[in-house]
Image (spheres, rainbow, N blue to C red):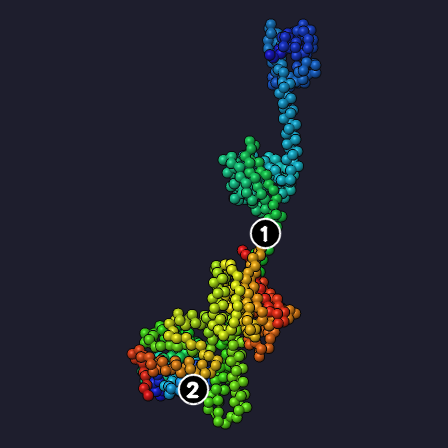
């Protein structure tokens, strides 16, 4: 219920309704005759009250009317305490929100529907490379001529018109040519569009740096691979040339030695003939060294063709083939059960041929050769071994055994070129396994190799 | 003017030529051999051009071809022989120093009739060449158009 006062031209209250009495904490009679200043006629005004009635703000609407043929002022007063309180609360909230926006690490701006800057926080101003005065109240096109032709602006326009939020990364070009990367968030708000902008220039530079490094690294890997391939090609050319060009002169030496033998035998004495046969043997020996070196080099270069290999079957084959050349001998074979492995069958066959023929070779002087073949099943690997009761070797030379053309025995005792175990080591290396040996002079030797379980 | 011979040997190394002729000579085949020293000359002979322009027509009974030849290599000579209607049927034997796998594979894919690695051991070499000569020049019936001199 609004309070109503009738005030005469002298400012004396002539009438007050009960609501007015309640508003001013008195009886209607007490109000009548008292003085009341009307602050304004016409438009309503808000005035504060301090009457201990719980009403602290009223809205006063005063009009001049004729009352009993005399001009008087009718004032209608409405309690607006509650509205005022809400408004004050809102103002406080706005101040708080504003200060939150002002202090944010991201740039915040509000753009009105006419593209004018309505609000910018300090970070946004820093990001703009302009002063607050150059922006606030001005349109974006005034501040940044041509901005309305950018992709960024068309996203902004869509957000403004269709009220759809949009989020993207934008490379902003300043009028002075400088560029900066920003992560932008467009949010439609009642005032227009709220823009949250985060400067990610540094981040972008870092990731570009990182990308450059990554590309550099990839290039390095490509270069190295190309170098390796070139080296590999060179090696192939080398071994081709070895096999081709070195063999030809050997063939010629042996050929002409034989022709000499055939055609001029009568003019040669026994010593001369022996020299010729030494020359001939040496050329044949060198040819076989070249061939073995080529096999060794091929062993390191050829592609592995892995499959499941039944070791028991492979070993049985190799043993029976080896025994063809040793048919007169007494050999007791002790072959344990052997597992299947993953590997290149041809290469693994060569490993077994070498180990088994070595065992046979170095037990040759024993009345009864004893050869044990087995496998220890380890946690991460399978360890195969070939043990014999042959001539053995001195452990201090154990590492020499696997070197190319390294031999621990004189040729006249045991023939061979010294490439067999080098091949074994190379093949097992390529299967990611290890090779080693144990032995004692005249007490036999054991050759081991491991293959990883996958 | 070169008389037509039944065996063409394409080999640039004089030692190899001599040893090969020696081996072929064991069966009196040496006189039936025409020796060319590079791939270009081999093709000139087969196509009767250059210094072989005036030779009598006819293909050799067999071509013994080294792979490493100056100017045009043996594999290219083989390729041209196999892609020419007039030469395609000539038996070709690659006679080379090494058993290089890529050469072996290429030779067979180009349609070689045999691939022989010259053994270092002369006795073996001698036997191999002799057998080749005897087989291709005497035993084998060459395709029509080849010239075969009978002793």
In the rendering, at what x and y percent does residue A10 appear? 68, 10
Q: Which residue is mark 2?
A: B22
The residue nearer to you, when weighing A229 against B18, is B18
Q: Residue at x 39, y 81 (%)?
A: B131
Q: Residue at x 60, y 35 (%)?
A: A118
Q: Which residue is mark 1?
A: A208
What is the number of callouts on the image?
2
Residue B64, picture quadrant: bottom left
Q: Residue at x 64, y 27 (%)?
A: A91
Please indicate, yes or no, whether residue A382 appears anywhere in the rendered image. yes
Please indicate, yes or no, whether residue B9 appears anywhere in the rendered image. no
Q: Residues within 10 Å of mark 1 (few under 14, many from 20)?
A: few
Q: Secondary structure at mark 2?
A: helix
Q: Secondary structure at mark 1?
A: helix
Would you place residue A428 above or below residue A34 in this image? below
In the rendering, at what x and y percent does residue B149 appear? 32, 85
Residue A129, picture quadrant: top right
| Quadrant where the C terminus of chain A is found in the figure | bottom right
Using the image, name the chain to which the residue with label 1 belongs: A
In the rendering, at what x and y percent does residue A11 appear? 67, 11
The residue nearer to you, when weighing A163 against A376, is A376
Q: Residues within 10 Å of mark 2 (few under 14, many from 20)?
A: some
């Amino acid at each position: 219920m609004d309070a109503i006062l009738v005030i005469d031209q002298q400012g004396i209250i002539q009438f007050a309704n009960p609501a007015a009495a309640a508003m001013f904490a008195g009886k209607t009679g007490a109000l009548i005759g008292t003085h009341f200043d009307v602050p304004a006629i016409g438009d309503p005004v808000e005035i504060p009250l301090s009457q201990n009635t719980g009403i602290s703000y009223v809205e006063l609407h005063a009009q001049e009317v004729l009352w009993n043929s005399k001009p008087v002022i009718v004032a209608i007063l409405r309690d607006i305490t509650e509205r005022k309180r809400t408004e004050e609360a809102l103002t406080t909230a706005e101040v708080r929100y504003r200060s939150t926006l002002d202090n944010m690490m991201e740039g915040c701006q509000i753009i009105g529907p006419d593209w004018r800057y309505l609000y910018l926080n300090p970070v946004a101003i820093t990001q703009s490379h302009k002063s607050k005065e150059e922006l606030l109240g001005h349109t974006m096109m005034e501040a940044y001529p041509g901005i309305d032709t950018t992709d960024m602006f068309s996203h902004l326009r869509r957000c403004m018109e269709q009220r759809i939020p949009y989020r993207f990364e934008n490379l902003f070009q300043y009028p002075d040519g400088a560029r900066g990367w920003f992560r932008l968030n467009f949010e439609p708000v009642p005032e227009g569009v709220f823009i949250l902008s985060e400067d990610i220039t540094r981040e972008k530079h870092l990731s570009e740096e990182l990308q450059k490094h990554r590309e550099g690294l990839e290039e390095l890997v490509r270069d190295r691979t190309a170098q390796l391939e070139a080296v590999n090609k060179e090696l192939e050319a080398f071994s081709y040339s070895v096999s081709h060009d070195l063999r030809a002169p050997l063939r010629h030496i042996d050929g002409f030695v034989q022709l000499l033998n055939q055609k001029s035998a009568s003019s040669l004495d026994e010593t001369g003939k022996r020299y010729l046969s030494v020359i001939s043997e040496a050329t044949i020996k060198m040819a076989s060294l070249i061939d073995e070196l080529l096999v060794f080099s091929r062993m390191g270069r050829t592609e592995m063709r892995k499959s499941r290999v039944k070791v028991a079957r492979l070993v049985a084959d190799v043993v029976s083939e080896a025994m063809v050349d040793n048919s007169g001998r007494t050999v007791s074979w002790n072959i344990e059960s052997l597992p299947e492995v993953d590997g290149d069958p041809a290469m693994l066959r060569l490993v077994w041929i070498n180990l088994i023929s070595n065992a046979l070779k170095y037990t040759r002087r024993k009345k009864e050769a004893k050869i044990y073949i087995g496998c220890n099943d380890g946690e991460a690997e399978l360890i195969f071994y070939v043990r014999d009761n042959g001539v053995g070797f001195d452990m201090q030379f154990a590492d020499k055994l696997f070197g190319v053309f390294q031999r621990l025995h004189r040729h006249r005792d045991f023939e061979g070129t010294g490439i067999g175990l080098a091949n074994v080591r190379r093949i097992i290396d390529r299967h990611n396994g290890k090779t080693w040996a144990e032995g004692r002079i005249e007490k036999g030797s054991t050759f081991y190799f491991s293959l990883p379980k996958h | 003017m070169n008389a037509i011979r039944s065996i063409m040997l394409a080999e640039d190394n004089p030692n190899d030529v001599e040893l090969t002729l020696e081996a072929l000579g064991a069966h009196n085949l040496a006189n039936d051999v025409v020796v060319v020293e590079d791939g270009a000359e081999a093709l000139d002979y087969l196509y009767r051009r250059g210094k072989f322009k005036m030779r009598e027509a006819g293909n050799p009974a067999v071509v013994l071809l080294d792979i490493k030849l100056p100017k045009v290599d043996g594999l290219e000579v083989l390729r041209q022989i196999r892609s020419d209607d007039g030469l395609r049927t000539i038996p070709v034997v690659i006679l080379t120093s090494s058993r290089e796998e890529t050469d072996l594979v290429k030779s067979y894919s180009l349609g070689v009739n045999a691939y022989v690695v010259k053994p270092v051991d002369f006795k073996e070499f001698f036997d191999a060449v002799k057998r080749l000569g005897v087989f291709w020049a005497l035993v084998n019936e060459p395709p029509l158009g080849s010239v075969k001199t009978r002793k």
